[in-house]
Amino acid sequence: MPIEIQNGKISIEVDVQEENGAICVVYSGGKAKVTLLPGHGETKVITHQGKVKRVKFDEGEET
């Protein structure tokens, strides 16, 4: 997925026919990244000193 950052605005082009499910856009430190979210589970964005360090996925269904 192409991401453009110009003049303080983020532009993302997503082909909805190609992508099934939810996406998450994370912007930190002048960079933007897009990730697909799992069908079931939790997604955690881990930060440290105001910057994104990682994105963690805990996939699975609760029993």
Image (spheres, rainbow, N blue to C red):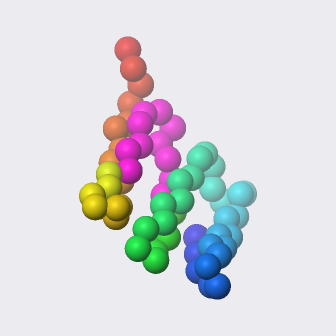
Residue 61 locus on image (x, y percent)? 41, 25
Query: Which is nearer the eye, 35 or 54?
Result: 54
Question: On the rendered image, what quadrant is the C terminus found in?
Answer: top left
Q: Could you say which quadrant of the image residue 2 lies in?
A: bottom right
Residue 16 locus on image (x, y percent)? 71, 57
Q: Can residue 12 be seen in this view?
A: yes
Q: In this view, does 43 lie above or below 15?
A: above
Write the start and end of the magenta stretch as one range: 35-45
Q: Could you say which quadrant of the image residue 1 lies in?
A: bottom right
Q: Is residue 26 left or right of residue 50?
A: right
Point out the residue furthest to the front here. 49
Residue 25 locus on image (x, y percent)? 53, 59
Instruction: Residue at 53% x, 54% y: name it.
Output: 24
Q: Is residue 20 above or below residue 2?
A: above
Query: Which is nearer the eye, 51 or 13?
Result: 51
Instruction: Residue at 41% x, 43% y: name it.
Output: 43
